[in-house]
Amino acid sequence: MSDGAARIAAAFPADRAAFIPYVMGGFPDVAASLAHARAIGPHADVLEIGIPYSDPLADGPTIQAAGQRALDAGTRPGDVLEMAEELRGGPPVVLMTYVNLLMAAGPRAFFERAARAGVAGMIVPDLPIDEGDDIRDAAARAGVAMVPLAAPTTTDRRMAMIGRRAAGFTYLVSVAGVTGGELEVGEALRRFVERARRAVDTPLAVGFGIRTPEQAAAIGAFADGVVVASQLIRMIEASPDPRACGPELAAYAERLQDALRAARNVPPGS
Amino acid sequence: MAEVTQRFGPFGGRYVPETVIAALDELADAYQRLRDDPGFRGELEGLLGAYVGRPTPLYRARRLGEAYGIGRLYLKREDLCHTGAHKINNALGQVLLARRMGKRRIIAETGAGQHGVATATAASLFGMECCVYMGRLDMRRQRLNVIRMKMLGAEVRPVDAGTGTLKHATSEAIRDWVTNVEGTHYVIGSAVGPAPYPEIVADLQRVIGDETREQILAEEGRLPGTVVACVGGGSNAIGMFRAFLDDAEVAIVGVEAAGDGIGTGRHGASLSVGRPGVLHGSYSYLLQDDDGQVAEAHSISAGLDYPGVGPQHSHLRDTGRVRYEAVTDAEALEAFSLTCGTEGIIPALESSHALAVLAREGRVMDAAGPVVVCLSGRGDKDVDQASAALGIDV
């Protein structure tokens, strides 16, 4: 197991689901996003940081707009890697971006730089499991875990392939759709997680559309982790001072982590 | 049954969210099963004849040829297709395919609006729900086609992101597909996108080249010396080129949009000055910055205003089988006017790019034998823009 994969696996608590908040690097600017990540960090088990990209196919309007604002503010991939470096010592950092940025940098150079910055894992939503062997190899050599995505439409045959190649954790897309949509936590989602469980050994984190601690708790009862992204961006957008809303974000993250504890009947604060 | 091609050399592939992979597999399986199925072929060919008006003529343009110093210049008249461009060949084929797959809803992206109109037409013909994504700027500059789509019963969804052009409309259509993948078929309009789309679109457009080959042989008793087509995503071009790729004696030229000029950075010449990368699901030449952020394209022609290109064109560029050139907005407008004035044909601004390269190379091309240009569409949709650019008073 790569160094990054081991660090991520160790960050998933044994007695409750992990909380994986998302911060868009450079939104509203690099310094503010770093401050937000620092505020959330103490209540996060794994921290997901987005590198803004011009054509984010898997993202709904909220993350698209945040990414565009980060790009308009001049954010470059190197800035986000520096952010990751600043966050060493906190929860393991998993970067999220699109495949063209990795290709443009050269996969080997990109992952070596990411590993030096202490990055533990990488999520690339437009790199399905049967594409980009060279990219996966480069990540493995650098000790960065390539976290695959699985969707409700993923066939059992592909789920088995994901099981063989997954590193760190596996990201289960809650619904067919883009980030930030409407999510109904119900039987279909539970069955999807069970289906993934039969094929995949890594922890299973569910994302896309999770907004409230209640939703997170409901999912945390049967999944190993929950990712919250668009909701945090909405909070930043709605804040009177989007550059200094760390305390609000921290309070939300704490409530969410508490809800995950309660979901497995672990007393808060333990 | 031959498997549907996924890669052209290193180009192509499926760089898309996992959610739509199952739908791409389903599409590839269905196409592999149906592409040579007599029932499917018969239905499509019947419609291409009676409804689209195929075969389209291969017309000898004597006065335009004279102006360019070309003795035997032929125009493949895709502008005479029902709805006014080659786009209907692909849209009809894909909508038929979608019906056989049991899909009820059709979505599409459009730049110049020709693909949107063609898709709305095919959807209307089969009573299917249709939603077309179109950039806000393109809606303004191709207003006539927006009206046509609405009359045909399609919903036109404006896309405000970025510059409001084809790149953004395509991204939004893909997001719709990711969200509504069950029951929806995405009719992609050019030879771009994740596999199997580039192969399906090329296959459905190949009728252009197959007819041309037969027609030129009947007319001239020989193959053309040169074949020319414009390249945005590259569907009319690949449809024309595929019929001649194995004929080494035929020179093949693709023409991209140089916009304000390659040196200005405001253009759509991905094959001329781009680098390989991923846009809209396939690996191909792409206009991008050093970090890999996709650049905005610029062209007077909404149909060529796209920073990517179909993956087979990238392969044909690298192997050298096809030579790609780029002409500016000004050169295209000049060819537009010349064709109006010499032939009584108003060409689309896209097709005017293919014609414009003749001003540079006509005399040299003439030495190699007959020249065939794919006149991919008619210019009715462009009259507002062209008259403004040419200073025509009404």
Image (cartoon, grey):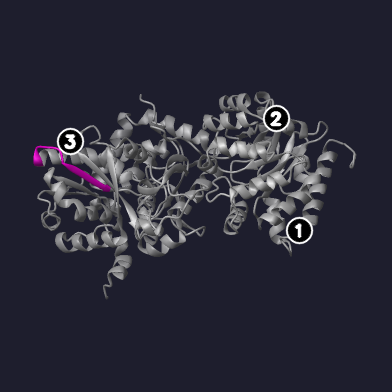
Name the residue nearer the viewer: A191 or B127.
A191
Query: Is residue A117 shown in magenta?
Result: no
Label 3 environment density (alpha carbons within 10 Å; few <14, some 14–19, many ≥20): few
Q: CA distance from mark 3 to mark 2?
A: 57 Å
Rendering coords of residue A3 (x, y %): 70, 30
Q: Magenta residues, as a range?
A: B220-229
Q: Nearer the viewer, residue B125 or A8?
A: A8
Q: Position of residue A8 (x, y in %)?
A: 72, 33
Residue holding disc 3: B249
Q: Residue type at mark 2?
A: Asp
Please determine whether, in this image, residue B341 is positioned above or below residue B373.
below
Q: List the residue tagged with mark 2.
A: A3
State the SS at label 2. helix
Q: Is residue B311 visible?
A: yes
Q: Is residue A29 left or right of residue A15?
A: left
Q: Residue type at mark 1?
A: Cys
Which quarter of the rendered picture does the C terminus of chain A lie within?
Answer: top right
- Labels 3 and 2 in the same subunit: no
Chain of the residue that carries numbered disc 2 in the rendered image: A
Give the left or right position of residue B16, taking residue A211 as reference.
left
**Disc 3 residue type?**
Glu
Residue sitting nearer the eye, B4 or A165: A165
Choose top left, top right, bottom left or bottom right for residue B202. top left
Is tag 1's residue or tag 2's residue first in the polypeptide sequence? 2
Residue, x 10% and y 42% (percent of image)? Answer: B219
Q: CA distance from mark 1 to mark 2?
A: 33 Å
Q: Label 1 marks which chain's residue? A: A
Q: Are marks 1 and 2 in contact (CB under 8 Å)?
A: no
